Amino acid sequence: MGWQIDTTQIEDLARGAAVFGTGGGGDPYIGSLLARQALSGGPVPVLDLAEVPDDAHVLFVAMMGAPTVMVEKLPSLDEVVEPVRALGSHLGRPVTHIACAEVGGVNSTIPVAAAAALGLPLVDADGMGRAFPELQMVLPTLIGVTASPLALSDEKGNVAVLQTVDNTWTERIARVATVEMGCSTMIAGFSMTGAQARAGLVGGSLSRCITVGRAIADARAAKTDPVEAAVRELSGRELFDGKVVDVQRTTTTGFARGRARIEGEGGAALTLQFQNEHLVAEADGRILATTPDLIMVVEGESGEPITTEALRYGQRVRVLAAPADERWHTAAALAMVGPGYFGYEMPAHRFDGTVSPGAGSETAEPVPESSRERIEAR
């Protein structure tokens, strides 16, 4: 059954979404500020996927660009709602429901703000069940839902509507436009019917974010291990515990790209590769987990999620892994979000270290020497 979201749930939602964001999705605090502002007028109704009518008009609302930029370029509510209004006008039919493209940091709370400001219901679902760095990387792409027409807005008042031939071209053109518009924009797109939303979205993802966020907070209050609480709720595992000793990060072509090295006891070390989100976790010449499964970094004692732009030398962290929605492990999905897409010459490794069935193997393998060299060079 449907429920309502209000200001009392935003902190748990933002915390849980930052966990599911796998390091990306933007600063959850910024999104929380926007959501709280928009919810000051009252709660927003949230519908289960089954409650969305077949003829509904559902849109994704999100931030596009490098999460590092949003720390200094705060969006306004006008900037958030303008793409929705522009797209509704362009399509000639009203938008009836707002949904999250991803559950990750700011992109879990910006749709809450949009729904509240527009007086529309929110769908308890998202397009990924996690966060990914590129626009086309949502499950609706796999069932033929088109990203365009896509509307973008910036803080200067610029608004654009793109019409493209496919979702990859939407990403390419919108990314260039986003860079020119200050490296972050607000977007609305992936116009869907209710029937398409039920077929393509990950149901219950907002509820799950709140549950994970609350479990971490409750464990801290009870003076138990919040990281263990998160691992239980995620049905995942802990990969590594150690200190951040090196972070290399650059913002290029609208992405925060880089790697981090974490050292643990006895000389063990883990290397993370990321492009907004963590993509590969490797230790001692073996791949522990890769995209599309979830790789998450949390503060060692508090369990607070740490985004890739917030990773710093000296932090004591724990690295977790959890399963992605099973649809991400089909061959077509892995071609879009697997390690190979990002330039890593290795099969997709699941959160438990086994190779994804979609990659054509069943057991984990050592990292080839050529791949390790390529990883170090990126």
Image: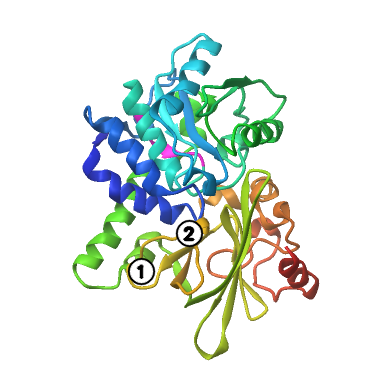
Q: Residues within 10 Å of mark 1 (few under 14, many from 20)?
A: many
The residue lying toward the viewer, choosing from 87 and 29, is 29
Q: Amino acid at mark 1?
A: Val
> Which residue corresponds to mark 2?
310
Q: How many marks?
A: 2
Point out the frontmost of discs 2 and 1: 2
The residue lying toward the viewer, choosing from 177 and 273, is 177
Residue 250 disc label: none
The residue lying toward the viewer, choosing from 21 and 73, is 73
* Residue 103 screen position, x and y as percent: 44, 45
Regarding residue 223, the answer to whether it shows in the image is: yes
Q: Quadrant of the C terminus?
A: bottom right
> Which residue corresponds to mark 1?
227
The answer to whether 301 appears left or right of 254 in the picture is left
* Residue 348 screen position, x and y as percent: 65, 61
Range drawn in magenta: 122-127
Residue, x 29% and y 51% (percent of image)?
12
Pointers 2 and 1 in contact (C-beta within 8 Å):
no
* Residue 59 screen position, x and y as percent: 48, 26
Regarding residue 204, the answer to whether it shows in the image is: no
* Residue 199 screen position, x and y as percent: 50, 34
Q: Earlier in the sequence, mark 2 or mark 1?
A: 1
Q: Please determine whether, in this image, residue 235 is positioned above or below residue 287.
A: above
Q: Please determine whether, in this image, residue 67 is positioned above or below residue 101.
A: below
